[in-house]
Image: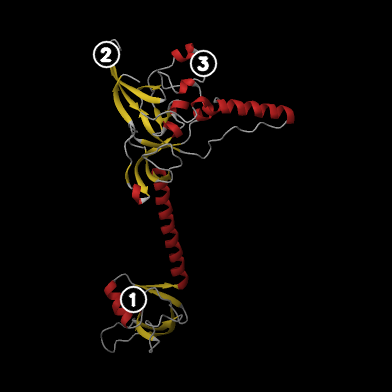
Amino acid sequence: MDVGDVVVPLCGDLDKRQILAQIGLYAGVEYVICEIEEGSDEEGTRSLNERTAILRPAYPLRPHLERSDWPISLPISDVPLWLSKATYEAGTVLGTLMLAGTYLAIASILATVVRVVAVPSESMEPALMPGDAVFVTRSIFTRPKANDVVFFNPPSELDDAIANSKIGRAAAAAASESNNNSGEASPSIVSTKGKHFLKRVVGVPGDMVGVRNANPYVTLQCNDANTDCTYRVDRTGDYSRPDIFPDESWNRVTPTITFDSSAELNADKAQTLAKGEYFVAGDNGYRSVDSRVWGPMKEKYLFGTAKWVIYPMKHFGPIQPGPSVIENGLI
């Protein structure tokens, strides 16, 4: 410390800081050293090497901190730590960057574990209304159960289902004809890129799943002759335009769908969901394109499970159960 230096006093002891503030030395404020006096032992209380600094603030302070007796004088050793202006500013920048980095790291971790998602459509009415905000937690240590609402990326099978629908085939034919006439590349019929879905889990790996009259079901148990069975049926109801998709979408005894009319192919399909497969459907089947149309959803597309509606406040609370019922026999 030399005359003319700009220094910043620091003190972590709150009681000590109050004592220093009473004489006009404020921690974290820049001071200019006006003079340094070498110590003496006239009073017998300080050593010959004690030095006293005479200093004043480097800039105007707030009115309640200003004093009429600047500069002030105090022993240098009374302050636990003196930093140069450059060192103090570097430390402040470093601390700010570390704090910002910590917040970003926490935000990044949270973004991979939880999300707040807006309900995009009417497919989950009445449990979820369009515009509702739901809290989604990532499925890391637990797997979805039947009746859970899951948030997931659109499976590639959805694109296949759309392409093989009546509208998809017509659009492909029109695009092909246009391509032949103009020589330009055929445009994509539809894109699900960037979209996400909220659907209810009907069946989990190992479940025997089928669809009857547009309602997906799980076979719970049967007698030895398979003539008397108990089913859990999700009464989702008919789709608004069932004619768009193959009839197999609305009536089949297997979870998968082949988009092929061959009875031999369909007869060979497994009746149970494989490991990592889920059968999902919207509560409002009239407005939902789901596993009835594209088949099982693979676990790799799954992000997590939605448990709570958090906005608007009139809908706040746990997501209501779906339209599933236990029945003996299928209607």
Q: Which element carries disc 2, helix, strand or loop?
A: loop
Figure colour scheme: secondary structure
Q: CA distance from mark 2 to mark 1?
A: 87 Å
Q: Is residue 183 above or below residue 33?
A: above
Quadrant showing the C terminus? top left
Q: Secondary structure at mark 3?
A: loop
**Mark toward the start of the polypeptide (3 vs 1):** 1
Residue 6 is labelled as none
Query: Residue at coordinates 41% horizontally, 74% vertically from top-left?
Result: 8
Q: Is residue 183 above or below residue 37?
A: above
- Is 49 located above or below residue 180 in the figure? below
The earlier-in-sequence mark between 2 and 3 is: 2
> Who is closer to the viewer here, 90 or 35?
90
Q: Which residue is mark 3?
A: 261
Give x and y (percent) for residue 291. Answer: 44, 28
Residue 223 is marked as 2
Question: Residue 120, image x and y in percent?
Answer: 46, 42
Q: Could you give the CA–CA distance between mark 2 and mark 3, rounded to whole angstroms?
A: 31 Å
**Mark 3 against mark 1, which lies toward the viewer?**
3
Expressed as whole percent of the image width and height from the top left, the position of residue 52 reads 36, 83
Kindly tell me whether residue 206 is visible in this rendering.
no
Q: How many marks?
A: 3
Which of the image's four quarters has the N terminus?
bottom left
Residue corresponding to mark 1 = 79
Which amino acid type is marked by label 1?
Answer: Val
Instruction: Sort mark 3 into few (<14), some (14-19) or many (20+) by Cα contacts within 10 Å.
Output: few
Q: Quadrant of residue 29?
A: bottom left
- The residue under the point 43% across, 16% down is 269
168 displayed left or right of 201: right
